[in-house]
Amino acid sequence: MDINEIELKEIKEDELSVSGDKVVEHQSIINELDIQLSVVVGTTHLTVGELYSLTKGQLLVLEQKSEEPVKLYYKDKLVALGELVATEEHFAIKLTEVADK
């Protein structure tokens, strides 16, 4: 196995600053990122035995009440709350609260 030495350049503090133009450029790139959001309608707890005995057509009652808001997440961060609604062909969320940015 060959091991090569590398030389690291010391970065001076003034080289770390970002100009206003660079911030706008980076923000523009960030704004174009595609992310996936998840909606949690409700939760329930089952034993492993109950999980294995689930059958097609069986109702699984969730702990949340029907009037409680659904939760919108980005990864594990709560982003917003809302009401689950149906459009012509899809489910949608009518946002009622949005988390601070």
Image (cartoon, rainbow, N blue to C red):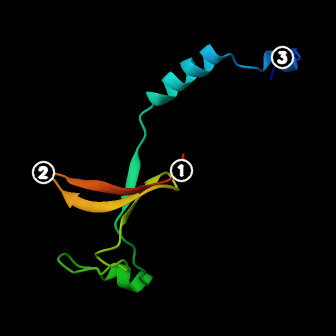
Real-space Cα separation, disc 2 to disc 3, in angstroms: 55 Å
Up-down relation of residue 32 to residue 95 (above or below): above
Question: Disc 2 or 3, which lies upstream in sequence?
Answer: 3
Q: Nearer the viewer, mark 2 or mark 3?
A: 3
Which quadrant, please, contains the C terminus?
top right
Q: Residue 40, labelled with which disc?
A: none
Mark 1 or 2 closer to N-term? Answer: 2
SS at mark 2?
A: loop
Residue at 86% over, 20% down: 13
Give neighbour class at mark 2: few <14, some 14-19, many 20+ (Cα, 10 Å).
few
What residue does disc 2 label? 89
- Residue 83 in the image, given as x and y percentages of width and height: 29, 62
**SS of the residue under disc 1:** loop
* Residue at the image position 43 percent from the left and 27 percent from the top: 32
- Reading the chain from its start, which is encountered first: label 1 or label 3? 3
- Does residue 45 show up? yes
Give the residue at the far left of this rendering. 88
Above or below, 12 relative to 84: above
Q: CA distance from mark 1 to mark 3?
A: 32 Å
- Which disc, if any, is residue 14? 3
